[in-house]
Amino acid sequence: MPMTRRLLLLTGLGSALNVGAILAVDRWRQADSLAEGDPVEATAAVSEAEVIIRGFQYLPAEVTLKRGGTITFTNEDSTPHTATPLDGAQFQGTGRLRRNESKVVVFEVTGIQNYFCDIHPSMVGRIVVVD
């Protein structure tokens, strides 16, 4: 492959990686601003919920849960994912979930519990735990 073609290919790869990094940082900043006390919309709290991981997203991205409630995280993607507590969140993460694996997580601490996928950090979600 000629040198100029290699340089163009490498430049394009570098640009793609930079865009991915910028998006990931933006998602982190959004999650951090949520943790700092952004207003929470009033939503009916449930005792049990399910969060599906599909298309590199948590569905739904936000759940309002009663204290002591549980969420079942299920990965429907072909790649592994996690639901890992973001700084300040107080719950045990799922660990690595492979395709079609699930994990039930209990939420005992009230407040906003932000989380992310530690394999794909641009994936973020939050659980609002209320009394």
Image (cartoon, helix red, strand yellow):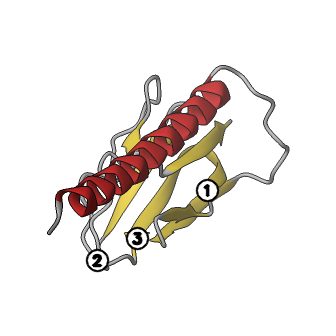
User: Against 104, is 114 above or below?
Assistant: above
Q: Which tag is nearer the camera, tag 2 or tag 3? A: 2
Residue sitting at 64 percent across and 53 percent down? 63
Label 2 SS: loop
Q: CA distance from mark 3 to mark 1?
A: 13 Å
* Relative height, residue 27 to residue 51 (above, below): above
Distance of label 2 from label 3 (alpha carbons): 8 Å
Q: Nearer the viewer, residue 8 or 107?
A: 8
Residue 23 — which label? none
- What amino acid type is highlighted by mark number 2? Arg
**Secondary structure category for the residue under label 3:** strand
Viewer-proximal residue, 16 or 23?
A: 16
Number of marks drawn: 3
Name the residue type under label 1. Ala
Outermost right residue: 42
- Identified at 57% across, 36% down, the residue is 26
Q: Nearer the viewer, residue 72 or 8?
A: 8
